[in-house]
Amino acid sequence: MKEYGTEALRNLVLIGHGGSGKTSLAEAFLFVGQSASRLGKVDDGTSHFDSDDEEKKRKITIRSSLGFVEWKKRKINFIDTPGYADFVGDVVAAAQVADAVLLLLDAQSGVEVGTERGYQFARARNLPAFIVVNRADREHSDYSRAVESVGEALIPGTVPVTLPIDEGESFSSVIDVLRMKAFRYAGDGSGKAAEIEIPASHAAEAAAAREKLIEQIAETDDALVEKYLEGGGLTEEELLTGFRAGIARGTLRPAFAVSAAKLVGVDLLLDAVAEAGPSPLDRPEVVSAEGETRKVGNSGKTAALAFKTVSEAHMGELTVFRVFTGTLEPGRDYANANKGKGERMGQLYFLQGRERVDTPRISAGDLGAAVKLRETKAGDTVCEANGSFLLPPIPFPKPVIEFAVVAKNQGEEDKIANGLARLQEEDPTFHAGYDPDVRQTLIRGLGELHLDIQARRLKERFGVEVELVKPRIPYRETIRGRSDVQGRYKKQTGGRGQFGDVWLKLEPKERGGGFEFVDEVVGGVVPGKFIPAVEKGVVAAMEEGVLAGCKVVDLRVTIYDGSYHAVDSSENSFKVAGSMAFKKGFLEANPVLLEPIYVVKVTVPEEFMGDVMGDLSSRRGKILGMDSQGPFQVIRAQVPLSELYKYSTHLRSLTQGRGGVEREFSHYEEVPKEIAEKVVTEAQAAKQEA
């Protein structure tokens, strides 16, 4: 295919609520741009982008996909992203490498939770936005109201560039108010349009929209403002120059009426992106994590960000890049700046959905993929050989839900661990590993669907089946009182016996104070060589727990007396004596159970504030404060981990899918007595059964 200079590239990320038609628009781009001979459809499983078995079955996008179209001497790259919160990591990564966002809205619904959430990531990178009001062919669609909802809920400065004619089920025509032309699209699925006269019924609306658009364009330049205020008309060249400048600066956000399914208005959207969308050269200079700057361009040193890893049987392992500066070429040596290791670049491709297109290089500003890299995964920077230019990390969201993994067939634990490790490499929002505190393998992610699909991938790709169960809570045990106890171990079975005798004092420490072992033995009543063995016995007992089998924390243990036998005493006997004394003293020192407390940040529309706060209180939550964040309210609270099982799912149900949650470990607190008694009883029953 033709090679394009950096100035001719356009990199778009498609963001929107689930079901707003992002994948359908991506398919329309391919077909209208003649990059595909047929129009792929999600519903019948022929999509070029939603090609994963789970995506076909569920008819939703689970992972981001890349495509491109050559249009008006430009190469337009676009990334189709998921609309569901469980897979928002791909949205974050795509926003990190795009130069503009196509923000999709359903013409019937306007701004929805996925729109709001997705745009937050685009706004964090100051991405210029094109507003695409899709599905204008649906009954009860309301283009004007959808455009208004953007200004009300998200961003001001949204102005229509195309207007629908006969909006609704008969939608087939649009008005381009920038050029004051109207087009009717053929109903044969070709996406071709013929110019028509602007209907008299829409002339006033079109004139008003054009006046508003020209006013917004004029404000991009002082000279244009002056000319406009003096009553002078702006030339077509001035309009396009100001239009492009306003989009690049983010002061103008053009809105387009589209039906991706009927291919109405798609070509006009592509025209606007090609003619007025920002190129990589319009974006700020590249700045490393250490503050070093580089200009975008092919000359100079290389800096490329891997933002996605794909591993499939029919594709092999692909690492997907955005090249910010320099070039990537196959067979050349580069450096992985994150890991400080060399990387030999493999064969390079441009991606067209699930298809690959060979390329001899990926130039500055372009998106592409390399095959079979050894070191580089999503989030890593590849730079010139022996270099250390590290691009800012992708701010992947942290997990909000966790399950324990149980093998359905014994003996497959190693295969499960290897499979989980591979899945974790491919998906930075998925965390997996063995937790010794609860003695379970835990997986963490962004939602139940996210983790359920990872479990299915374990079966399909690695041949192992697992069950996802509620994880144990990593409780802790400690004391509130003091005790002085003796631990005496004596065993005689013929021959050399076992003898160890110690006196220990147990005292509580402040929360988070850790463990301290103090030796106050005088006079050699316990030989110094046996003191470490006593400490080992205490530590072993602390690891096992006394009340509920949970780790003991935050106390001081002092050995101050004891006795020994010249023949029968040994390190092992004093280790046992230390353990015995500790367990006895622990039970006499007012023992208590501690539970992990998390700080949660819940973001919800104001109308759900009361329900959410009441629900948090019912979960023993303590409200810390509330703040406004645009159209949202942010509630901060402390909640016990035991009350957060499946909370993200419950929150979505409580808020009609519009609530989001983040959580982070804070500290340990004492468990209420009635709950502690229940936990201890259950733990002791489980121990007896085992």
Image: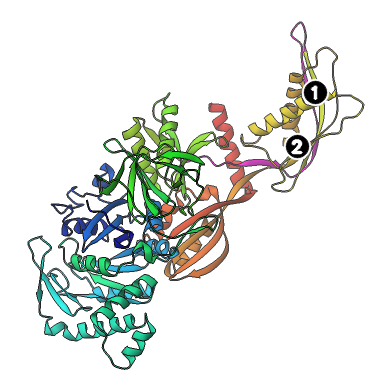
Image disc number at residue 223: none
* Residue 669 x/y as whole percent: 64, 50
* Residue 408 x/y as whole percent: 39, 29
* 2 vs 1, front mark: 1
**Against 181, is 634 above or below?**
above
Q: Nearer the viewer, residue 467 or 184?
A: 184
> In the structure shown, which secondary structural element does the residue marked by tag 2 occupy?
loop
Whether residue 63 is visible, yes or no, is no
Q: Nearer the viewer, residue 120 or 442?
A: 120
**Coloring scheme used:** rainbow
* Residue 226 x/y as whole percent: 36, 89
Tell me the quarter of the picture where residue 57 sits: top left
Q: Residue at x 51, y 59 (%)?
A: 601
Tag 1: amino acid:
Phe
Q: Residue at x 42, y 43 (%)?
A: 377
* Residue 73 x/y as whole percent: 22, 62
Q: Nearer the viewer, residue 399 or 591?
A: 399
Residue stretch rendered in magenta on the structure:
471-497
Tell me the quarter of the picture where residue 30 sits: bottom left
Of the residues under marks 2 and 1, which one precedes in the sequence? 1
Residue lying farthest right? 523
Look at mark 2 in the image and give the residue it sits on: 588
Look at mark 1 in the image and give the residue it sits on: 530
Tag 2: amino acid:
Glu
How many C-alpha atoms fall within 10 Å of the one at disc 1: few (<14), some, or many (≥20)? some
User: Is 409 a magenta residue?
Assistant: no
How many C-alpha atoms fall within 10 Å of the one at disc 2: few (<14), some, or many (≥20)? some
Mark 2 and mark 1: Cα distance apart in space: 25 Å
